[in-house]
Image (cartoon, coloured by chain):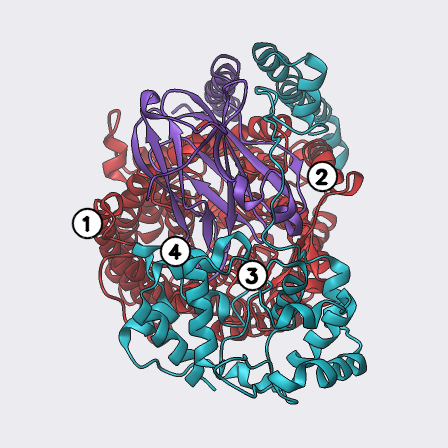
Amino acid sequence: MKSLERLTLAHLWTAFIAFAVACVFGLWQMLARSPIPTPGFTPSNYFISVTAHGAAMAYVLTTFFIMGFGYFTAETALQRPLPGKRIAWAAFGVGLLGVVMAVVPVLLGRASVLYTFYPPLTGSAWFYIGLVLVVASSWVWCAIMIVAMRQWKRANPGRPVPLAMYATVANAILWLWTTVGVTVELVFQVIPAALGLVDTVDVGLSRTLFSWTLHAIVYFWLFPAYIAFYTMAPEAAGGRLYSDTMGRLSFILFVLYSLPVGMHHLFMDPEHSTGFKFVQMTLTVLVTVPTLLTIFTISASMEFAGRLRGGKGLFGWIGALPWERPMVLATGLAFFMLWFGGGGGLINMSYGMNAMVHNTSWVTAHFHLIFGGTVVIMYFAIAYAIWPQLTGREAPSLRAQRIQLWLWAIGMMVMTLPWHYLGLQGQWRRVAQFDYANPIIAAWGSWVVVSVAGGAMLLASALLFIWNLAAFHRARTPVQAPFRFALAIHPPERVPASLNGFGLWNALVAVLMLVAYGYPIAQFFIHDRPVAVVHRVDGAQP
Amino acid sequence: MAARTEHEVLATELRWTIAVVASVALISLAILWAGLVHFINPPSNLETIDPTKVHLSPEFTEANLGTRVDEGGRVTTRIVTAQFAFIPPCVVVPADEPVTLRLVSPDVIHGVLVTGTNVNTMVVPGYVSQVHTVFQKTGDLLMPCHEYCGIGHSQMWSTVRVVPKAEFKPGPDGRALCEKP
Amino acid sequence: MSEDVFREIDRPWRLWASAIVVGVLAFGCLSGFVILPVIQGYQAGIDPYTAICRSLGILPGSPAARQPVSTAPAAPVSQVSWGPSLIARLNKPDAARGQEIAASVCAACHGEKGLTADPAQFPNMAGQSAFAIYKQLHDYKSGARANEIMQPVVADLTDEQMADVAAHFAALQQARWEQTWVRAASPQVETIVRTGDSARGLPACESCHNPRSGGPIETPVLFAQTKEYLALQMQAFKSGSRKNDLYRRMRSISEKLTDSEIDQLAQYYFEQR
């Protein structure tokens, strides 16, 4: 088992170091946008920082965390050695090389195009090629996850795949579908432009391809949090999972409905028709279903645990839960933030209300709360839960872990509530500085300062998190009990083949994608759409 | 929560699922209703224009930008969003009357919103973006670029001057210009 | 228990899942492509066929509003358009011909190596962006930019010849583009050059004129340009006597600069070398 732990630790440390550095950039950006004078401020430094922050959080933290956690889950949940460990190490090397290739031009100011690219602006080709390598390494991970499940199924005919692994493979399949859009955009449009092979780019097509990826990627990031809700939180609370079947169903719904909905990021775009926007909006409404099912199932599991521990009455079980355990605390805090973030999401997804908030701080607030809040706090909890297994040692202080989690949740609320409000006031996104002499903008000043305080708390929490993880490596107490995933109250003895595999769901995703994205992509090839001249930010003239 | 048998668990979950599906259906129907009754539509247009020839086109040539009232009395405001300015930097529009904003980018992706209103659209090179709206509040509103368009993005903003209907006086050629912004 | 049982109990799942997925999709398509456009179009006086085509994206325009028309005539400030063939020509010029034209036509004033013979009158050309030079040559020829000396000089040049000579000068001394991070003399100039001034809506000079900024294609390089030429052009943009800048970029910026700022900026860029 030793080699698995090394593999997992390599991935997770890469993820968390990128995360901590990105938090430093984040706080500096908030200062720049506030009325407070900021050291080292120039617009070009600001956009270097935004690009670094976004790419590190969205591509490095998530991808490496998910790969590392996936390897861990495959071996732990299936109780058999992970296939292809050498290939996994090679993929890790390729991914790390990609990160370095991408980071260097960003820091040199040769790739200030943000992590969402925006062609016809084009940065250094190294940046994009580096990111493609990160994606390529994650494809290897997907293959290993699928092979691991296949091997287990063959060795255990007639037994349902453990839920944690079923969910991990669901995420691998979702990711394979998801990355098609951005990879095609980068390989066929952006990289040729960055290399100077072409001088023009079809912007409508590139935006459409990116939107293919842009929503589903968020669910790729979200999966580990939901895996923790279903398979770790009930165990940590001293109970059982209420329903294994609902877990499977929720993960399947994510695979189905996080893909054909990306156009809701293009609601305000001119290159798509009202009809296709409506179709994708209808499908977007459905992504709330798995989340609402999860909230119910996990709340029921927690109630079960609370009552086992002697909780009585309608709400008495809540107080009876072991809140001193980081996983339970993080689940509670994540659910709290999910209510706010999910509520905001309901506003974003209707195109009528989207016009009110599109590209304002509201949207920044929304995804920081959903991703930074709900998802990343569960990454913390997962790390705290599996680090004893990975290092063979117990945490020296659960209290420091709890402080870190509280600090993160409070900081996130203090940062994002003012952003939501400012967004409704019309504060727009992606600017390096505001003119606080303007009367409309002056009124925002104090709220911006409050959000900076939230950002400072987040940075403090991030650094404490790194400290807490490092403390495991220095700790002396050997691990007490081996790690295990939660079981259901009634573990399923037989499940329909559809809930034990992905054939049906892949077919349905293909149907949905064909209807939702078929013509919207084909139109750029059927009709002669104008192209835009490439604008290079890395010095090379067109 | 009942959990004596697996059947009981699934029955409970099914009841909750029905509640979830019902509320989701309600949201969808509400959106459909808003479209049917209030004509809520996203700013789709699909009208194309070659970004490298925007300045050569009759409609978006520099001298024809800004607000114009046509023979039928319809108010149309034409704006070019370019790195890193709006042309013209100030537009005047009447309050409480339908206004069509038409925006074009000659270079990279831009986006605009007007603070305090529902006006919001991306401006993608290659397309004419179009927003139909009615301004209700009079005064100078801020219209910034809200999509990253380069290092000068933060300085890219303009003014929408909403004047009472009675004070909106287009010239004989139908054009209305901002007095000194 | 074998896999067969899994498949046995799977039949209703396959059926229901497919039915629900297709059903929701059908609801979305029916509403988005038929019900909404037909009813919205009816209110706006658009026939159902057009409204449905608009909702599908086959025809331009919104299903809920009629398209405005424009009858105003065109009055472009410059005839230059960055088409793919022009960009290709600038990137792959006929170098020999460019050099030949430069030597016979340009060298007397702009110097054999692109360095001016008289800083008070003529700008430096060495290391200038090919796109910037081409645009100005073309504008002289079309009359978009008025200049008594240049107009007759370019009158007989073809578009290809202008591209070749522009690329020739651009290829000289390109190295000096890299020296962009010299501190400005006064904090005021520093702000305008690097940070910009949001209150006046002034983007930083560097957001376009730094060759790495990804700004407009035709942006000229300012480093080591003569200060007289720079000041003169900013003043010309400010007064409106020069107006061949696309979308008023330099006119609207120069209008916001004071005379003293113009002089300081000209001095600043002159000193960057």
Label 3 and label 4: CA atoms lie apart by 15 Å
Label 3 and label 1: CA atoms lie apart by 36 Å
Q: How far from the left and from the top, in percent, is residue C193?
A: 38, 71
User: In percent of the image, x 40 and y 76: which residue is there?
Assistant: C266
The residue mark sitting in front, 2 or 1, is 1
Chain C, hue in figure? cyan
Q: How far from the left and from the top, in percent, is residue A372?
A: 39, 51
Residue C52, above or below A230 = above
Residue type indicated by callout 3? Pro
**Tag 3 secondary structure:** loop
User: In percent of the image, x 38 and y 74: which residue is there?
Assistant: C265
- Using the rendered image of the protein, determine whether residue C135 is visible from the camera's viewpoint: yes
Q: Which residue is mark 1?
A: A446
Q: Chain of mark 3?
A: C
Residue type indicated by callout 2? Asn
Asked whether the residues under marks 2 and 4 belong to the same chain, the reply is no
Q: Are marks 3 and 1 in contact (CB under 8 Å)?
A: no
Label 1 and label 4: CA atoms lie apart by 22 Å
**Residue C216: which numbered mark, if any?**
3
Chain A, hue in figure? red
Q: Which residue is mark 2?
A: A506
Label 2 and label 4: CA atoms lie apart by 47 Å
The residue mark sitting in front, 2 or 4, is 4
Asked whether the residues under marks 2 and 1 belong to the same chain, the reply is yes
User: In percent of the image, x 49 and y 83: which residue is there?
Assistant: C224
Q: Which residue is mark 4?
A: B155
Asked whether the residues under marks 2 and 3 belong to the same chain, the reply is no
Q: Quadrant of the N terminus of chain C?
A: top right
Chain B, hue in figure? purple
Residue type indicated by callout 1? Ser
**Tag 2 secondary structure:** helix
